[in-house]
Amino acid sequence: MTDPTPIEKKLATATRLLQQQDMAGALKAAEEALADDPAHADALYMAAVASRYLGHTEAAFAHLEKLQKSRPDYGRAWQEAGHLWRSLGDADAAIGAYQGAVVRNPALIASWQMLVQLFNAAGDAPAAANAKRHLERFTAMPRELVSVTSFLHEGKLAKAEALCRAFLQKNQHHPEAMRLLALIGMELQILDDAEFLLESVLVLEPHNELARLDYVNVLHKRQKFARAREEAERLMQDDPGNPAYEALYAHECVATGDHRTALDIYDRVVAQVDDTAAIQLARGHALKTIGRHEDAVAAYRAAYREKRDLGDAFWSLANLKTYRFTDEEMKQMAKAEAADTTGATDRYHLCFALGKAHEDQDDVEAAFRFYERGNALKKAELRYDADAMTAELALQKEACGPALFEKHDGNGCPDDAPIFIVGLPRAGSTLLEQILASHSMVDGTMELPNILAIAHRLNGRRKQGEAPRYPDILHELSHTQLRELGERYIEETKIYRAGAPFFIDKMPNNFRHIGLIKLILPNAKVIDARRHAADCCVSGFKQLFAEGQEFTYGLKDIGQYYRDYVSLMDHWDSVMPDQVLHVQHEDVVAGLDVQVRRMLDFCGLPFEEACLNFHQTDRSVRTASSEQVRQPINAKGIGIWQRFAPHLAPLKAALGAAAPADFTP
């Protein structure tokens, strides 16, 4: 256990003095902590609490204003604002603040208590009854689990996990503790454990709606869409007419490709509920996926009209890539992005959308400022470590040498159906997928998680600081085990296929695991989608991804990742010559016919004209390039780095030897 830092000692002192009602001493300790870190969330919060008790209302509000600007998701800051407004006699402002608190952290019992009182005083019986239900739930919960819930929503996952596991040691098979531990696992991306825990909860309590909701969520995250749809349908059947469950079922219909059913449900739910923003956003995503562009635009606009600061609606419009914002929309986005009440998630969505809007108007300086701000906000909520990723990729080169592949030559599952398209996001992989999926013998699927899941299982559960088992464990696997892993991959991916002899797995991050792929599926084809390094990195920097791709939220990080990617791909070429086809995006743009025939030859497929007319292929496309691959080939994305050249020195330095000769920021 590490010793506390100086600022942690000062915060511990402030906490102790607050508990002892020594508000002056607590304020002094909090201010000393703020001298070390003026934006420290806990220090600002404690300073605000102490200031309120001392009657320093303006100072308390000032501390909260700083806190809410830096951490709009900090629920206790909103609760403290509620206490301040209540002390000033402004009931409406207090209600708004307390509601903001419980949205961000539902375990704040004091906020629920105040909402019950204030709603009763205002004569709003339904709202008071709803707040009372939440209050009763949390007051009946063991105090340890209330704290776990609070830590979870504050992002203090280590504290939440330690407390939850300690509780479970004394209270084995406690359903709520198991559910909370599953939620922590989901936050930490330990999805198989989370799925198992939630399955266990539902065995103990089959009618636990919260657990079943979470179960649908984890199944969806693991891309077990058919199972997720079944569980969502059960919720809908158990509570007929519940619009939340109907919407959830519609989401899973989208995931399984049943867009007609989903859109029918969305249309019905929109007519039933007062707050339609989330439903309209989901409608827009479904319409975009099936290529109904104008209808998708209308749905996204309806969403932001319902909720003026809904960043995701504006970003979804920007993410169509072909949409151009009106002046009025840009004013609305700018106003929402600047507002103190805008949450962190909405704010960075708005920043990326504003970046796109200003870039379309050729205001490159403003565009870069917003892209940079959006990336910084997004990166702040992640735990990405660029050097740790470099070390992880280096392990692949160390473990997967020629001897490993010679030892297992001719083993694994012989099925030749998979075609893996790997590389970096925004490198042109969706275009290559669309070309190949236009062939009558090839099914296009999506970015499948199965190879990543196999690697995760091989790595096993490890303690913090413990060396990884994978990829070294590949040396310990028998011929039989490798074949069984390949067979499992083929079996698990059948759900995504439509009956063609071949299918595409377009998970870009699979480039990290080409050694594993070729050991378990030696006849699989691997295509590396590559793009000019500067264009690829800048395009990634401008993109807000739905999930994953944490390396893209900083020019240094994305440059370092690209450099490591090139180095690892060079390694695969050296130990497995001619096993990976490298396709340069610029070559595809310059000579589509040549590159199409080259890919088809590599995959052992006869030429079909449809592959040249890929933009006419009618299929669902889920990635950010969905609108672009429905257009004929063009050179719009070539040389985009040049617009931002004055800002790209950190990128070139990070790329190192991988920087192209013509990249001169």
Image: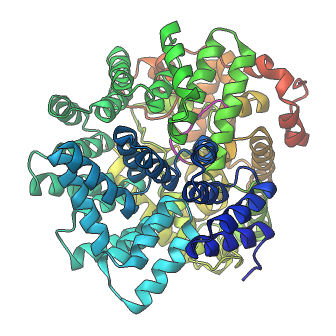
The answer to whether residue 570 is magenta is no
Direction from residue 385 to residue 100 in the image, left or right: left
Up/down of 532 relative to 384, above or below: above
Q: Residue at x 58, y 27 (%)?
A: 338
State which region is magenta. Answer: 540-547
Up/down of 441 relative to 408, above or below: above
Name the chief secondary structure element in magenta. Answer: loop
Direction from residue 664 to residue 430 in the image, left or right: left
Residue 51: % across, % down: 61, 55
Mark yes or no: residue 116 visible.
Answer: yes
Among the 4 quarters of the image, the one containing residue 222: bottom left
Among the 4 quarters of the image, the one containing residue 370: top right
Q: Nearer the viewer, residue 187 or 626?
A: 187
Direction from residue 393 to residue 616 in the image, left or right: left
Residue 477: % across, % down: 60, 78
Q: Nearer the viewer, residue 18 or 78?
A: 18
Mark yes or no: residue 413 visible.
Answer: no
Residue 97: % across, % down: 42, 45
Up/down of 179 relative to 222, above or below: below
Q: Quadrant of the N terminus?
A: bottom right
Q: Residue at x 49, y 69 (%)?
A: 485
Q: Quadrant of the C terminus?
A: top right
Among the 4 quarters of the image, the one containing residue 2: bottom right
Q: Nearer the viewer, residue 652 or 338?
A: 338
Colour scheme used in the picture? rainbow
Q: Residue at x 35, y 14 (%)?
A: 294
Q: Nearer the viewer, residue 490 or 78?
A: 78
Query: Residue most toward the front?
Result: 55
Residue 181: % across, % down: 43, 73
